[in-house]
Structures are given as structure tokens and as C-alpha cells.
Amino acid sequence: MRARVIKIGNSQGLRIPKPVLEQTGIKDEVEIEVEKNQIIIRPVKNVRHGWDAAFKNMGEKGDDKLIIDDGISNSWDDKEWQW
């Protein structure tokens, strides 16, 4: 597929056909990278993808309890800190 570089304000851009955007999953934001004289455009990945399911799974297994470290102290805790 060919496309023309067009003027957009003081910049230049490409019009990407809707089917191409749908096929690649591109919606609002993209990552742009130059590699060996090629422009690579990819959708921004949700870095927290799957966290909801993982946290739900942890809760169901009881693996989401607060960790309290009762056994470790140091001299600063004993002398300087007031409980």
C-alpha cells in the first residue's frame, strides 16, 4: 500500500486507512521507532494488562495478605524510635 506524506501544520504526516488501524490495534497512542532507515509504528501496550485478573486470583488464594516483618529490628529502632 502506498501513502502520501502530507503537510499538517508545521509538520508532516501520513493518513492511515481505518482497516489498517483496526488490524494493528492502533487507537489513540503509538510508539514510533526508527530502525535501519524504517519507521516502525506500533500501538502503545497497556503495561498493567492482566493485573486485574492476577490480583483477583491472589485474593481468591488468600495470597494478598499484608506482610508484617516482626523479626527484624536494628539499634536505631531500639534507641531512637518511640513507639
Image (cartoon, rainbow, N blue to C red):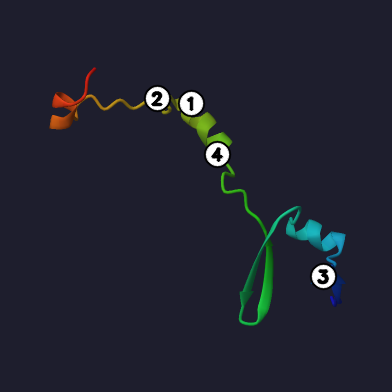
What secondary structure is found at the residue carrying circle 1?
A: helix
Q: Position of residue 32 (x, y in %)?
A: 66, 66
Indicate which disc, 2 or 1, sits on the residue closer to the N terminus: 1
Tell me how far mark 4 sits from mark 2, CA to CA.
Answer: 17 Å
Q: On the image, which quarter does residue 41 sit in?
A: bottom right
Q: Position of residue 5 (x, y in %)?
A: 84, 76
Indicate which disc, 3 or 4, sits on the residue closer to the N terminus: 3
**Picture disc at residue 65:** 2
What secondary structure is found at the residue carrying circle 4?
A: helix
Indicate which disc, 4 or 1, sits on the residue closer to the N terminus: 4
**Picture disc at residue 76:** none
Type of amino acid at the residue the image marks with label 2: Lys
Q: Position of residue 56 (x, y in %)?
A: 54, 29
Tell me how far mark 3 sits from mark 4, CA to CA.
Answer: 35 Å
Q: Disc 3 or disc 4, which is closer to the eye?
A: 3
Is disc 1 surrounded by few (<14), some (14 to 19) or many (20+) residues within 10 Å?
few
What secondary structure is found at the residue carrying circle 2?
A: loop
Is disc 2 surrounded by few (<14), some (14 to 19) or many (20+) residues within 10 Å?
few
Q: Which residue is mark 4?
A: 51
Q: On the image, which quarter does residue 10 sit in?
A: bottom right
What secondary structure is found at the residue carrying circle 3?
A: strand
Q: Which residue is mark 1?
A: 59
Q: Disc 2 or disc 1, which is closer to the eye?
A: 2
Type of amino acid at the residue the image marks with label 3: Leu
Type of amino acid at the residue the image marks with label 4: Trp
Q: Does 43 appear above or below 78?
A: below
Tell me how far mark 2 sits from mark 1, CA to CA.
Answer: 8 Å
Q: Which residue is mark 3?
A: 14
